[in-house]
Image (tube, rainbow, N blue to C red):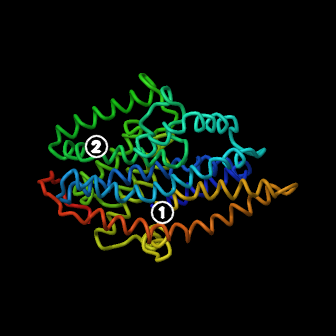
Amino acid sequence: MGYMAWWVVFAHSSQLTGIERILPVRVTAFMDGGEPAVNVFIMLSGFVITHLCLSERASYAQYIRERAFRIYPVYLLCLALGIATLPALLSAHSTPWSIDPHMWQVRAASEREHFAAHFLLHVSLLHGLVPDSIFPYSARTLLGPAWSLSLEWQFYLIAPLIVALVSRSRVSLVITSVVLLAMSWISRHDLIWTWQYPSMVLIPMPLFLIGILTRVFWGELGRIPVGMVLLVGIVAGMFLGALKHEFWIWTIFVAAALQESRLTPVRGLAWLAANPFVVWLGKASYSTYLVHIPLLIVAVSLAIKIGGPHVQLMVRTAVLGVLILVIPISQLLYQHVEKRFMVIGRRKIRPSFDTPTAADPAQ
């Protein structure tokens, strides 16, 4: 997850500094504003939550409580920071290299005119569920990256039901998958409502399903040679068009995890996963993902005010400073907010119920 969070951070930084405009087309297409990283995380979320549902005995209330205590505390802090930095938002996006400055003006106007509605939707974490055709910019106001957090929360709410259905029987798995894919197709083609971003849980449901089904079939995958898994994944990715990079990354992750489960780590990938510095960064990646935008907005707006004729150099220097500063800030948030509230979330005795079981857990 740490790599994905920093992918988004670098993508946003390149947009705010204008570096994106001078990078090779293939590089900017691969970065794509951080969207591929979010898509990979959606697949990973489907895998991890499915594993939790299949391997733990907990009531739905306890499951939701743990998820809420995991994501809400840091989110509310960063939401407050996002609201505090709203006055600087337009300034940060007023540079000659800014992408779609008109959009930022319209979004700022919506934040001013409908602040109470935006705020209440964000506090509920359901702001991404509201169609843009009903309430424009609902998903991306106040704290931009939180649109994907709303998506994640929506998935948390329904994941136990989906996992129970797909793990009940092969017939149930096929019917559930077909129904979800059909609903996703309807949502993505704006047949009823329109979403500017894939912030409603049905829109990226195929990505969640990739993670879910990977976990459900983990036992079967464990009996396939890793080289064959890689080959099939790479070939399949060639036919996925815009999602090929995400699918290739996911295939490499699955192959490495399978190899690791056989006690023969993949050289290179094992280092990337177990390197102490990478692990240290990864633990705070959730905080990094949420806090970097308010910090960037403040730094860029200040650099613009004092930059004079060297404004772009000042902006790039300020952003570089933020990239360094966000590391200790994220660690502080992780140590003093995330960890403490995760412990609180697990305190209650779990009322147990039998959860459907699938193939061997991904240990």
* Residue that badge 2 annotates: 158
Counting from the top left corner in percent of width and height, residue 225 is at: 30, 60
Describe the element under mark 1 as helix, strand or loop.
helix
> Which tag, 1 or 2, sits closer to the chain's start?
2
> Which amino acid is tagged 2?
Ile
Which quadrant, please, contains the N terminus?
A: bottom left
Mark 2 surroundings: few (<14), some (14-19) or many (≥20) residues within 10 A: few
Left or right position of 222 against 102: left
Looking at this view, name the residue that lies furthest to the bottom. 276
> In the rendered image of this protein, does residue 134 appear above or below residue 143?
above
Counting from the top left corner in percent of width and height, residue 19 is at: 72, 53
Q: Count the marks.
A: 2
> Which amino acid is tagged 1?
Ser
Describe the element under mark 2 as helix, strand or loop.
helix
Picture residue at 50% right of the left edge, 75% below the top: 277
Looking at this view, name the residue that lies furthest to the top. 191
- Please name whichever residue, 248 or 297, is drawn nearer the observer in this view of the structure: 297
* Residue that badge 1 annotates: 285
Mark 1 surroundings: few (<14), some (14-19) or many (≥20) residues within 10 A: many
Left or right position of 121 against 46: right
Looking at this view, name the residue that lies furthest to the right. 309
Left or right position of 357 against 109: left
Left or right position of 137 against 215: right
> In the rendered image of this protein, does residue 112 appear above or below residue 322?
above
Q: Which mark is residue 266?
A: none
Picture residue at 44% right of the left edge, 49% below the top: 149
- Please name whichever residue, 10 or 258, is drawn nearer the observer in this view of the structure: 10
Counting from the top left corner in percent of width and height, residue 126 is at: 40, 41
Which quadrant, please, contains the C terminus?
A: bottom left
